[in-house]
Image: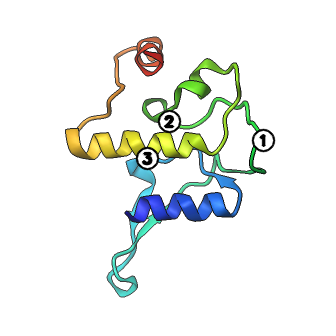
Amino acid sequence: SQAVAAVRHLHGLHVIHRDVKPQNLLFAARGEGGRLKLADFGWAVHTRPGDRRWTLCGTLDYLPPEMVRATEGHGFGVDVWALGVLAYELLAGRPPFAAPAREDTYRQILE
């Protein structure tokens, strides 16, 4: 899909987006063929393959376990995880991890 292609392109440039979510997926105007665009690079970071990052950032419902645990750092996989959460949300109509309290959402992500 176009979202996967956008993330693949970023990773090819050694950029981790770190906040892939529906609100950051925009459809281009008709003149551009209605293509999907990935927006909001506020948490994005340029890195080298194999490097680990330690910042807890992004949107709670889309955080991967390694970011929640904060014991091993994170890399390009955080965007792949978020794409999986996004796919689940598109199919189920809700995110797979959502609880009233932040700590409960963290627990769901880690289980």
Name which residue type carries label 2.
Answer: Thr
Residue 74 screen position, x and y as percent: 67, 34
Answer few, some or many: residues within 10 Å of disc 1's Cα (few below 14, many 20 plus, some between 14 and 19): few
- What residue is pinned by disc 1? 51
- What residue is pinned by disc 2? 59
Q: Kindly identify which numbered label has been placed on residue 7.
A: none
Q: Which one is earlier in the sequence, the residue at label 2 or at label 3?
A: 2
Name which residue type carries label 3.
Answer: Leu
In the displayed image of the protein, which residue is found farthest to the left?
92
Q: Tell me the mark number nearer the camera, choosing from 2 and 1.
A: 1
At x 38%, y 39%, the residue is 85
**Disc 1 + disc 3, Cβ < 8 Å:** no
Name which residue type carries label 1.
Answer: Asp
Against 78, residue 45 (above or below) is below
Q: Kindly identify which numbered label has been placed on residue 83.
A: 3
For marks 2 and 3, give the CA distance. Answer: 13 Å
Q: Secondary structure under badge 1?
A: loop
